[in-house]
Image: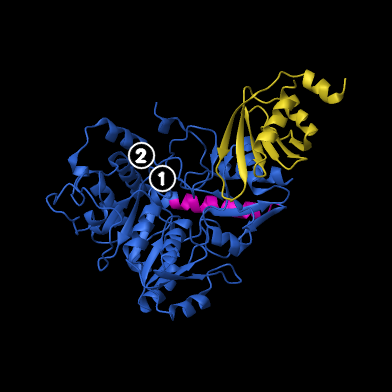
Chain colours: A blue, B yellow
């Protein structure tokens, strides 16, 4: 019996996706860090890839066979872009964002506009460039309603930014940023636009052409429930980034110089073929089940947010019901230090959560949780109604 | 026999067998996982009140305890697990560990 078929957890959410492997009793609500369980077929695809002799088809960037090419094709479909060769396969969103930020070759104090909602995987590459005096950073804060400050953003655009880098959704509060509108304005101002879709890819449509995004970075291991150590960067056709790493590509080997063609231009070295095989399987599953999966994730997130709002002593951050959120919620429980609540939820109740700053220090300053961060629960389409109810009951018990 | 001694005599000794430094988000904090040679029991947990303010949540699915020691360290864990988590002010870890070890296995 496979792990996939042994799970018979009830699924009361409407039209849920087929069950995925779930070998423990833990209630996993840390999907903003890593999606789990993995999509059906991922583990088998990784195992198959490891058991077979390595194929040179996976060695050469840009070829039409092998898991890398399969991933590129599927990502191009997901993003609704015509050319799979504009998809660079990376080790995750951090790698993709570094490729984007450093690859643009910003210098001479170029203006970069970003926001307080960003993850350190955007902020730290920018801070590095700032320390080298290659960029100046303007950060857009939150307005009184908790959204990005549109007035400040418009004012900042008058400084003619070279780059505008915005998170599609906060990994702290789950709030979805209005990137389509902001990027349209940024393009009018002549900026290159970089979208960090780490939290949204797999949960929302991420279409660069519609969102006016020149660069889109996302991981394979969060919303797509693929293997860790996978991700991608979409690079718009008119942009040519400088590589972070050069070396073997499996072609043009007589040349001293790294190939210029995409995607090999930005991919050097032997790819992680087993992980890419798993990622291709995750995309294949997602292509078949994305609608019910996203509906379930959305229902689980709403149930979580609505439930937390009703528990006395729980302070929900950015908990308004009228704004658009993913299934990511941050909160405090009066009487429970954040880190301690995390230990109790995990070890006493089996609820896997995340505590602390979630690598988004500016966001915590903006929402008033910088001292100890927040307790974060993050749902996926594999979470069930009973999962959410059990997590809410655990929080209520702590708060009692 | 003083109550603490009586409580100590009711239980088997317990050794701290390992200390693991845990990562956390904040500069300057020191979070450790202490590993024991056996699962913790209720008498082990009750002993902790000798070190400071102890709260014991017996009605949780796996009973949870937390201690704020008089000297500042905080300790938390779950009954039945062979580990606990300790947050100590900078440089205070070794002293607190010795204090805890002496409590669990009196000389």
| Prevalent SS, magenta region | helix
Residue A240 visible in image: yes
Looking at the rendering, in which quadrant would you find the C terminus of chain A? top right
Q: Position of residue A256 (x, y in %)?
A: 16, 54
Q: Is residue A272 above or below residue A364?
A: above
Q: Is residue B79 above or below residue A120?
A: above
Q: Nearer the viewer, residue A213 or B107?
A: B107
Which residue bears the numbered disc 2? A42
Find out whether the residues at labels 2 and 1 contact each other: C-beta distance under 8 Å: yes
Q: Which residues are magenta?
A: A294-311
Question: The numbered mark 2 sits on a residue in which chain?
Answer: A
Question: The numbered mark 1 sits on a residue in which chain?
Answer: A
Q: Is residue A270 above or below residue A96?
A: above
Residue most extreme to the right: B1
Which residue bears the numbered disc 1? A225
Q: In terms of image quadrants, where is residue A108?
A: bottom left
């Amino acid at each position: 019996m496979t792990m996939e078929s042994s799970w018979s957890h009830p699924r009361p959410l409407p039209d849920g996706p087929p069950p995925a492997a779930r070998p423990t009793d833990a209630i996993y609500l840390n999907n903003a860090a890593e999606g789990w369980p993995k999509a059906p077929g991922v583990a088998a695809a990784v195992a198959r890839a490891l058991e077979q002799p390595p194929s040179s088809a996976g060695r050469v960037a840009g070829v039409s066979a092998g898991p890398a090419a399969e991933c590129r094709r599927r990502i191009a479909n997901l993003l609704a872009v015509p050319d799979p060769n504009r998809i660079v396969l990376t080790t995750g969103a951090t790698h993709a964002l570094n490729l984007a930020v450093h690859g643009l070759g910003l210098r001479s104090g170029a203006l970069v506009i970003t926001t307080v909602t960003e993850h350190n995987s955007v902020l730290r590459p920018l801070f590095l460039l700032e320390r080298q005096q290659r960029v100046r950073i303007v950060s857009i804060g939150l307005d009184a309603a908790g959204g990005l400050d549109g007035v400040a953003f418009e004012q900042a655009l008058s400084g003619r930014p070279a780059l505008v880098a915005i998170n599609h959704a906060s990994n702290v509060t789950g709030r979805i940023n209005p990137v389509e509108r902001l990027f349209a304005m940024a393009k009018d101002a002549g900026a290159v636009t970089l979208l960090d879709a780490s939290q949204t890819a797999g949960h929302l449509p991420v279409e660069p052409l519609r969102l006016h995004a020149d660069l889109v970075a996302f991981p394979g291991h969060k919303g797509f429930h693929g293997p860790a150590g996978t991700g991608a960067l979409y690079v718009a056709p008119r942009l040519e980034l400088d590589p972070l790493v050069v070396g073997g590509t499996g072609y043009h080997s007589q040349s001293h110089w790294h190939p210029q063609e995409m995607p090999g231009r930005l991919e050097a070295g032997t790819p992680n073929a087993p992980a890419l095989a798993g990622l291709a399987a995750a995309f294949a599953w997602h292509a078949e089940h994305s609608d019910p999966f996203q509906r379930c994730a959305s229902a689980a997130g709403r149930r979580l947010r609505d439930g937390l709002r009703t528990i006395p002593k729980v302070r929900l951050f950015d908990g308004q019901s009228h704004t658009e959120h993913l299934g990511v919620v941050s909160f405090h429980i009066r009487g429970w230090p954040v880190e301690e609540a995390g230990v109790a939820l995990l070890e006493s109740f089996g609820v896997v959560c995340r505590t602390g700053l979630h690598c988004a220090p500016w966001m915590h300053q903006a929402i008033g949780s910088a001292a100890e961060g927040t307790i974060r629960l993050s749902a996926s389409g594999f979470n069930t109604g009973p999962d959410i109810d059990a997590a809410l009951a655990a929080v209520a018990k702590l708060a009692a | 026999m003083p109550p603490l001694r009586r409580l100590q005599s009711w239980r088997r000794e317990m050794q701290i067998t390992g200390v693991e430094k845990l990562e956390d988000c904040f500069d300057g904090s020191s979070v450790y996982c202490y590993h024991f040679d056996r699962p913790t029991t209720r008498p082990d947990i009750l002993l902790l009140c000798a070190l400071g303010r102890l709260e014991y949540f017996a009605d949780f699915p796996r009973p949870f305890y937390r201690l704020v020691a008089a000297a500042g360290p905080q300790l938390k864990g779950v009954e039945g697990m062979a580990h606990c988590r300790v947050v100590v002010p900078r440089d205070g870890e070794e002293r607190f560990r010795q204090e805890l070890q002496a409590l669990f296995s009196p000389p």
